[in-house]
């Protein structure tokens, strides 16, 4: 079975600084997809970024980028120029190659941003 | 963008009663919807996969007779918590993909906070 591990329950960063959230996963599949979701206090799930396993190039979305290391099964999220609005719980998620499969989430990392 | 509407957003019910939660895809058809449960400050745990026109697939440890799922159309899935007990109090979230491809991101409803008294 696939698993997703986020080893940092809490992280903190100052405004304008950079922070990296770590995520590792375990799978025997060669084709899969990885995501980072943000959940603010409203509890709405917001997609931050996604990565296709077959792509070597790391995905980027404005201030958000990932470091995808397929061999190491690592998928970290880097937030640059952190803003107060980035404060939230961040979940790393995995889905396999079969259509109709759900996302498997890590336990999450709570990010606080200070001014 | 793809929108998933979940209703109600908050419900309080008495122990022993049943509660129905609706999940609708507003601008797309979803052959598959997913139901998650989330306790405070914890992760989303998959409860079941709802398939249009067929029985839901439940995750291990989830009581199918307690959490009834019906996916009667391509835009509506319902979760009914039967004979609710205080331990069923939680945050329930539904989700769906706008396209039937595995790499499409899941779109989430805004969740339902269930409190059983």
Image (cartoon, rainbow, N blue to C red):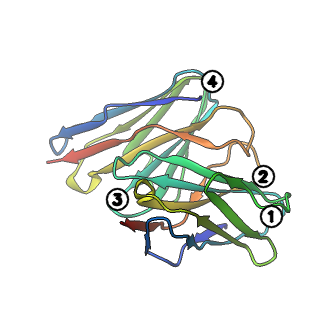
Q: Quadrant of the C terminus of chain A?
A: bottom left
Q: Chain of mark 4?
A: B
Q: Where does label 2 land, which residue? A: A97
Q: Quadrant of residue B101?
A: top right
Asked whether the residues under the numbered discs 3 and 2 touch, taking CB atoms below 8 Å apart as contact, a structural biologist would say no
Label 4 and label 1: CA atoms lie apart by 28 Å
Asked whether the residues under the numbered discs 1 and 3 touch, taking CB atoms below 8 Å apart as contact, a structural biologist would say no
Q: Earlier in the sequence, mark 4 or mark 3?
A: 4
Q: Are marks 4 and 1 on the same chain?
A: no
Q: Where does label 1 land, which residue? A: A29
Q: Which of A21 and A96 lies nearest the eye of the viewer?
A: A21
Q: Where does label 4 land, which residue? A: B29
Label 2 and label 1: CA atoms lie apart by 8 Å
Say which element carries label 4. loop
Say which element carries label 1. loop
Residue A77 seen in the current view: yes
Asked whether the residues under the numbered discs 4 and 3 touch, taking CB atoms below 8 Å apart as contact, a structural biologist would say no
């Amino acid at each position: 079975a696939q698993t997703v591990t986020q080893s940092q329950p809490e992280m903190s960063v100052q405004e304008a600084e950079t922070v990296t959230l770590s995520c590792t996963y375990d799978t025997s599949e060669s084709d899969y997809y990885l995501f980072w979701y943000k959940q603010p206090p409203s509890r709405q799930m917001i997609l931050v970024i996604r990565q296709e396993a077959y792509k070597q190039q790391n995905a980027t979305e404005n201030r958000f980028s990932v470091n995808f290391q397929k061999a190491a099964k690592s998928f970290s999220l880097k937030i640059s120029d952190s803003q107060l609005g980035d404060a939230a719980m961040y979940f790393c998620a995995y889905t396999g190659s079969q259509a109709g499969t759900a996302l498997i989430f890590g336990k999450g990392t709570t990010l606080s941003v200070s001014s | 963008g793809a929108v998933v509407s979940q209703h109600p957003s908050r419900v309080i019910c008495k122990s022993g009663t049943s509660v129905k939660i609706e999940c609708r895809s507003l601008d797309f058809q979803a052959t598959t919807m997913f139901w998650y449960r989330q306790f405070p400050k914890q992760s989303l745990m998959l409860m079941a996969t709802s398939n249009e026109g067929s029985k839901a697939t439940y995750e291990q440890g989830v009581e199918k007779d307690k959490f009834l799922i019906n996916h009667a159309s391509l835009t509506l899935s319902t979760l009914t918590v039967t004979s609710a007990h205080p331990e069923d109090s939680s945050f329930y979230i539904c989700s769906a993909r706008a396209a039937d491809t595995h790499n499409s991101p899941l779109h989430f409803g805004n969740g339902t906070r269930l409190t059983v008294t």
